[in-house]
Image (cartoon, rainbow, N blue to C red):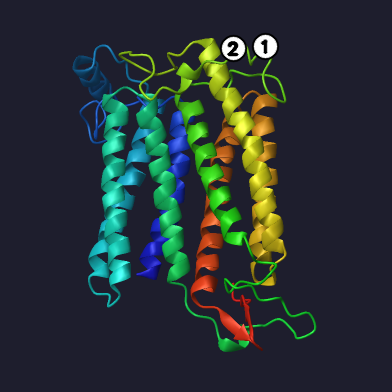
Amino acid sequence: MRRLCLFAFGLTLVVVMLGAYTRLTDAGLGCPDWPGCYGFNYVPGSAQDHATAALRFPDTPLEVSKARNEMVHRYAAGTLGCIILLMALWSLRSSQSAYRGFAWGLLALVCGQATLGMLTVTLNLLPFVVMGHLLGGFTILALLFLLLCKTRPPRQSSSRQTPTRQTPPRQTPSGQTHRGRGLGVWFVLALGALLLQIALGGWTAANYAAMACLELPVCQGDWPGQWQWSAFHPHGVPAENYQYGVLSQDERVTIHAAHRLWAMVTACVLLILAWRLWQQPALRHWGAWLALGVVMQLALGVANVVLHLPLAVAVAHNAGAAILLLVLTGTGERLWRARANPVPVHGFVAVTNEN
């Protein structure tokens, strides 16, 4: 079960990155039908296939490179669905009902994700569906990582280390140490801020607003005067096809500015959480990874603007968001485990150093 979960996690990370690559290469409609491509189960390659594709979809000329990007993404996503189905079936042999519920819940999410993938094509890249498809992929990735954390083999008891008697932490009525008090609150704030930032990033990409602002730190010109709340309407402007965006320039500037401004808020909250984690010996490595991820993500965001959205940097920016979410997922699992199983030390409650 753990090996299947590990394979599914790695494949999900690949699928998320392939999805970003497909979106950034404007290949979301590389195949105008679903689940095939111009009626084929493969990318049309021969001259006869091209002629058949032109007859089937005369208004959508075949672009082989875009069709290939889209179909590779679909093949990987389909394989992932099969692996998670196998996990769900295998979980029936498990004596732990929690794992069965987890595996079947993942399978339900994958089915929903497949539906969103179909709607992405049939609704011609409707931004709300595209953003939902992105969030669905990140959710599956985080849940698989959480399952990996929960099913990791237990460490030997010798690996446990406890605080010394020299500077014992002051116990609080809630059972937490004085330095660790409020850590859960900051974690919830950080997770909420990051999820909203990921959603804003997906909304920015889905509305082709990544290059709406070409200056730093915010936008060129009077961007507050250009602010349009209509930019965040779920349905947006009715259109037959949403590829390359249908919103006005002011609305795209609004979306981009909101993404940048909330990025600053998110970075501050995450860095505060990283500092609080660093103060806890058992969680210090999570704080270090979180701080490093924030710095790298900010650098990639700046590089996207300065270098005018190079493909490699843009894909890496998506990967950075996924890594930050995984770090928070691991941190949350560790905090929950420490709260559920506190280790008494000479009358005090302390977090163990188990990673």
Amino acid under label 2?
A: Gln
Amino acid under label 1?
A: Asp
Q: Residue 322 versus residue 182: which sits nearer the camera?
A: 182
Task: Specify whether 171 is left or right of 153.
Answer: right
Q: Quadrant of the C terminus?
A: bottom right
Residue pictured at 48% horizontal, 67% vertical: 149
Task: Specify whether 130 is left or right of 92.
Answer: right
In this rendering, is residue 108 above or below 19?
Answer: below
Q: Mark 2 to mark 1: distance in Å?
A: 7 Å
Q: Are marks 2 and 1 in contact (CB under 8 Å)?
A: yes
Q: Residue 10 versus residue 229: which sits nearer the camera?
A: 229
In this rendering, is residue 228 above or below 179?
Answer: above
In this rendering, is residue 51 above or below 343?
Answer: above
Count neighbours of disc 2 (C-alpha within 10 A) and say few if under 14, some if 14 to 19, many if 20 or more. some
Count neighbours of disc 1 (C-alpha within 10 A) and say few if under 14, some if 14 to 19, many if 20 or more. few
Could you say where residue 86 lies in the image, as x and y percent from the top left? 26, 61
Could you say where residue 277 lies in the image, as x and y percent from the top left? 67, 61
Extreme residue in the front direction: 173
Could you say where residue 325 lies in the image, as x and y percent from the top left? 53, 50
Query: Which residue was labeled with disc 1?
Result: 222
Which SS class for mark 2? loop
Query: Which residue was labeled with disc 2?
Result: 226
Question: Which quadrant holds residue 238?
Answer: top left
